Each structure stands twice: as C-alpha cells, then as structure tokens.
Amino acid sequence: MTTTTTSPAPPALSSRGRWTVLAVCCLSMFLVGLDTTVVNVGLPAVGRGLGAGTSGLEWTVDAYTVVLAGLLISSGALADRFGRRRVFRSGLAVFGVASLACAAAPSVGALVAARAVQGVGASMLSPVALAIVVNAMPDPRERARAIGVWASVFGLSMAVGPVTGGALVAGFGWRSLFWVNAPVVAVALVLSARFVPESRAARPRRLDLPGQVLLAVAMATGVGVLIEGPRVGWTSPAAAAACLVVAAATAGFGRVESRRAEPLIDPRLFRGPAFTGAVLGAVAVFVALNTTLLLNTFYLQHARGFTPLQAGTATLPMAVAATVCAPWSGRLVGRFGPRPPLLLAGGFLAAGGLCLTGLDRHTSLYLILLALLLIGIGFGFANAPITDTAVGGLPAARAGVAGAITSTARQLGSALGVALAGGLVAGTGPAQLARATRPGWLLVAGCGLLVLLLTRAARSGANRQQG
C-alpha cells in the first residue's frame, strides 16, 4: 500500500513548475492509456500477420491490462520506498524496451509475452504519476483541477486509441502500433529527468508478497476463464478447475489482507460508500468502453468489410466527445462535486448501449455513429468524478492508495470488457456476428445504469467532505 507523505519535504515548486510536472506525468499516462486500446483496431491485421485466433488476439490485449492491473499497487509501494521519480523513469524504460519487442515479435506467443512486460512497465507509471502530481499540488483546489486533468488525459488516450491505431495500421502496418511508443518514451525520459522532483514516503510500507501473488492469480485466472471458456467449453474440467482456483485465490486474498498490518489492499477502505462506489464505477466504465471497442472492431471489419482505417475513423465521434467532455467534467467536479458529471456519464453510456441492442448487418451507419458519440460523451464525463470521489473519500495522505486502487479497477474493467466481448464473438462467422454482439451492447447499457446507481454514494461522500 502506498502513502503520499514525503520526507524530507521537497522545495515548493512555482506555479509553472507544478503544471510542468503535471504535463510530464500526463504524457506518460497518455502512453499507458493509449496502449490499452490502440491495439484493438489492429487485431484483425495482427491475426492475419501472426496466424492468431480470437483467443490469441484477446490475450494480446489482456496480457497487458491484467499485468498492469495486478502490479499497480506494489509498484506504488516500491516507488514510495526507492523514490517516485526513479521508479517512474524505470517504468518508462521498461515500457519502451517492451514496445520494441512487441514490434519485432515473430509469433503471437512472443507478442503476448512482450505485452505482459509492457504491462510491468506501465504499472510503474500510473499510480506513481498520480502520487507525483498530488505531492506537487499542495493547494486542495489546484490539486482537484490537476487530478481532473490527469484523469481526463488518461481517459482521452483510451478513447483516441482506435483512431490512432487505424491510421497507423493503414499507413505502416500493425507493427507500427508499438514502434510509435519509442520516441514518446524518449521525450518523457528527458523531461522527467529535468522537471520531476524526487520524493519518497516518510515511512514506506512493506511489500505484501502473499497478497500480491493471490491478487495476480485471481485476476489472471479469472480473465483466462472468460477468454478460453468458449474454446475449451464452459463445463469442461479445465474451466471448472480454473473457477475453483479463482474462488480459492479470492477467498485467500480477503483472508490474508484482513490479517496483515500493512496489506496490499486494506479491506477497511471499502467501508466508505464513496470509495467503494468509485472503484465499482471505474470497473463499470472501463468494461463498457472496452466492450464497445472490441465489438465495434470485429463488427465493422468482419461483418461490414471496413478497413482498419475506416473502422478507426468510425470511432471519431467517440474520441471527439471524450476530448470535449473530459475537461468539462473536471470543471464540473471542481464547481459542483462529482455527482452531476456522474449522472451525465451513466445516462449517456446507457443510452449509447441501448442504441445497438438490435444491431444487424444492415444497421444504419448513422445509428452506429450516434451510439459511439453517446458512449464517448459518457466516458468523457466519467473519469474525473470517479478519481475525485476515490481520492476525496480518503485522507490526503492516502491519495496514492486511492489512485492505485482506482487505476487497478480501471485496468481490471478493461481486461474484463475485452474478455467478455471476445467470448461473445469467438468462432462466429460474419453473417452471425452482428446478432452475437447484442448481449454486449446490453452489457454496455447495464454498466451505464450501474454508474447512475453509484451517484448516490458519490453525493454522500461529497456531503461528508463538506461537513
């Protein structure tokens, strides 16, 4: 578990210096978010190039997100102990080298392995970046705006991933999806060395190795069941054994964490409805986003014959909506609290999903674009209030903890969304693919409704903070 108290206190930064630190951290977070979704639109090209089936393609996405989700909190603890800037820059280096390995992968197995290493590097960026930002912004109002910007950039990066990916695949082939990271990493390494101050926790917490192992086993096995279930059979002995492993690891994790003095995830944090609601909301929003992206990619390219560039371009309404609404959401949070943007997020996500519950091969492209626009609006409004609610629901010294757990929830939602969506379309031919996606659009709508239900927890949390 992490803390954001530093010792000794670093010199106060100027206003320009504080916002420069935020810009450097946002650049790294843009990379982390982009790599969660940029690959989606290139999956058919990857499959053709490496001879991969649907499950292999799902693992290409989820190897990154599962590893990222599983290691986020431990990486934050390492940063508190050894220095946040040091771990941050190490993460950039690992991420960059792994990206080059992805670009040169000779087989789908090598690509999946390199994507997992990418996830290791990314885990050293996300919670550490938030802790650096929180430490650089001592004024609560300025910190709230900075958190809004940080969350908005991360959400925006995921929304523009398909557009970027489509353009890269069309112009340079699928390997360019990974080559493009190298120059950005190089710039971020230079800027972080120049502008980001070093900081450590006054009392670094011990690493929780038993909790880390159990969390990783539960996440990886759970996602693996969802990905491989359609192939091996849901009632097969292998699937049943995997489900037992997930149940045992989850139960063991809860038992271990409740007994440790310094747990990886303190169960007591979830006693507060605001924090619990923020975590559940993060999972729901990212399940909805990644379900949308994967189903849209397979539907447009396989059922409608779109090229990767055309399929990526079709997501432009979603990307533009997220771009416009994300900073607006941050301003709304600063003025009115998290509840209004959460209401907008849940309503638009639900409406977008409901638009496509009757999807077929001849559905109007205008309706598809409208649905993606609505989902993009919902996604754009969601991230800032979720992060603010999580951070605001805990003491200031635990902002890093809140950031790490909500980041874990986001990546878990991403992995679950890909696994669930992939299971719906696995082995489905072009003629039946549209009908196969319909439960996925109901899932997207359901995620929006869940966000609406969670606004009550956000409101009560805001009221407590005001009191």
Image: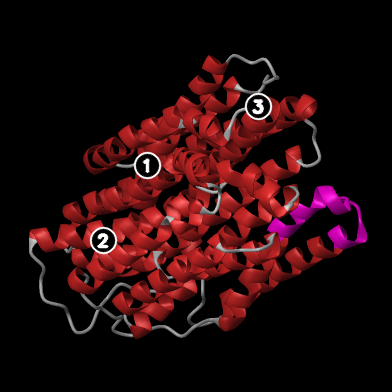
Report the residue marked by disc 1.
Answer: 459
Among numbered discs 2 and 3, the one appearing first in the sequence? 2
Mark in front: 1 vs 3: 3
Across the whole image, how many numbered discs are drawn on residues?
3
**Marks 2 and 1, Cα distance to the nearest angstrom?**
32 Å
Circle 3 crowding by C-alpha within 10 Å: few under 14, some 14–19, many from 20:
few
User: Which quadrant: the N terminus?
Assistant: bottom left
* Residue 365 x/y as whole percent: 56, 17
Is 433 located above or below residue 167 in the figure?
A: above
Report the residue marked by disc 2.
Answer: 24
| Element type where label 3 sits in the image | loop
Among numbered discs 1 and 3, the one appearing first in the sequence? 3
Which residue is at the front of the view, 157 or 454?
157
Among numbered discs 2 and 1, the one appearing first in the sequence? 2
In percent of the image, x 49 and y 63: which residue is there?
A: 99
In percent of the image, x 68 and y 19: which residue is there?
A: 358
| Element type where label 1 sits in the image | helix
Which residue is at the front of the view, 18 or 192?
192
Queried whether the magenta region covers residue 145, the answer comes back as no
* Span shown in magenta: 222-240
Mark in front: 2 vs 1: 2
Q: Inspect the image, locate mark 2, and give the three-letter code of the amino acid beneath it.
A: Val
Q: Inspect the image, locate mark 1, and give the three-letter code of the amino acid beneath it.
A: Arg
